[in-house]
Image (spheres, rainbow, N blue to C red):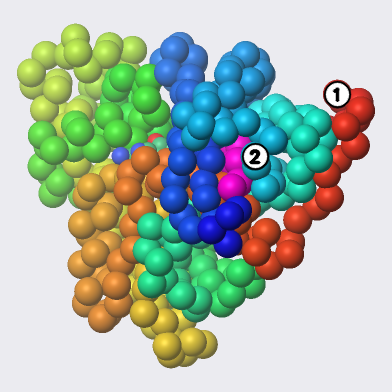
Amino acid sequence: KDDLVVLGIETSCDDTAAAVVRGNGEILSQVVSSQADLLAKYGGVAPKMAEEAHSQVIDQVVQEALDKANLTARNLSAVAVTIGPGLSLCLRVGVRKARKLAGSFNLPIIGIHHMEAHCLVARLIERELEFPFMALLISGGHNLLILAHDLGHYIQLGTTIDDAIGEAYDKTAKWLGLDMSRSGGPALEELAQEGHAESIKFSTPMKQHRDCNFSYAGLKTQVRLAIGSHNINPEIPISSASSQDRRSRADIAASFQRVAVLHLEERCDRAIEWARKIEPSIKHLVVSGGVASNQYVRARLDHVVKKNNLQLVCPPPKLCTDNGVMVAWTGIEHFCMGRFDPPPPADEHEDYV
Ligand code: KG4
Ligand code: ZN
């Protein structure tokens, strides 16, 4: 396993990422190119623009990942690439690059599920983490609570019935006039520190549903109404807001965050109870995905986990947001189980995917 060296490529959303990881978990390189200027300009991800941006940098990002690892493609054992879920136009850029490289150097190729990668990267950073374990995966497009039985064998305990939490963070940030150049989440987390979390009484979603599903559309609507009633103009960036206006925005940010995360806490609490009925031996809850890089989220979930006598495994922020390491590592996990595809033909037509 130590001799394995896998390149991971990730282009499912707005980040173009590549990394080289060794079978023993050593990260040899890690490169991410984000589309800050596009995000700021469009206030979110525009698929066609994102595809073009990926196409412009993909060769460079992959080359840099190889250079930083002091390797050429010839030294690789396999290429892993995210094949979904995500924006199909964007996914294709990564898949095309992976197939080209694998074809030219006669390397096996491993197609990776983006959310499985968010989940399994936890096993790279916490080597004690054995199946079965639980995972809460929170990103821009997904909210998942799962019981991970074994590699490739996952029981879904809960999912979102409308929006994911990251989407709610992004929209709230946009409506509060925050700087969107690094996605809304981090900017909102920062502003929330200035506000009073109890000042606006948003109601917690799905209180009456005694399941483990999520809903963030209603909370988004509540936020939009609060923004209107506080006379906040999203067109005015927060940097130009008066101090009173800024305070209102911070209060909305803090109140939103409290309830958005309380919803996670309540669902996790119940999911742990459910999971224990299926698998009494679970010891860990993994929390991963972009939103898991939020310090408030981490602290609140740590509390839930401790209360339930479990251990929290939360990858460092750089491995929570989209990255190539998680793809390379999940590739290693699959490769070791013999789950990979043979090298694609070297002369494959460019438009195969
Ligand atoms: O996993 P990820 O990088 O991409 C997807 O798979 O969607 O997650 C991106 C999401 C975005 O919605 C972003 O606003 C959110 O994660 N995010 C955060 C933070 N950092 C990223 N949300 C809250 N607080 C953060 N610090
Ligand atoms: Zn993601």
Residue 49 location (% of width, % of height): 61, 16
Residue 220 counted in the magenta span: no
Provide the residue designation for mark 2: 75
Q: Which structural element holds mark 2? A: helix
Residue positioned 49% across, 58% down in the render? 24
Depth check: give the residue in front, 220 or 268: 268
Does 294 appear above or below 144? Answer: above
Residues in magenta? 5-11
Three-letter residue code for mark 1: Glu
Q: Using the numbered discs, state the Cα–Cα distance from disc 1 to disc 2 in whole angstroms.
A: 24 Å
Residue 177 location (% of width, % of height): 30, 20
Does 70 appear above or below 203? Answer: above
Q: Locate residue 204: give its quadrant.
A: bottom left
Residue positioned 14% across, 22% down in the render? 246
Q: Which structural element holds mark 1? A: helix
Does 225 appear above or below 135? Answer: above
List the single residue furthest toward the left: 243
Quarter holding the N terminus is bottom right
Depth check: give the residue in front, 319 or 100: 100
Q: How many marks?
A: 2
Residue positioned 41% across, 82% down in the render? 282
Neighbor class of circle 2 (other Cα within 10 Å; few <14, some 14-19, many 20+) is some
Provide the residue designation for mark 1: 350
Q: Is residue 178 left or right of residue 106?
A: left
- Mark with earlier residue (1, 2): 2
Depth check: give the residue in front, 301 or 99: 99
Three-letter residue code for mark 2: Asn
Residue 10 counted in the magenta span: yes
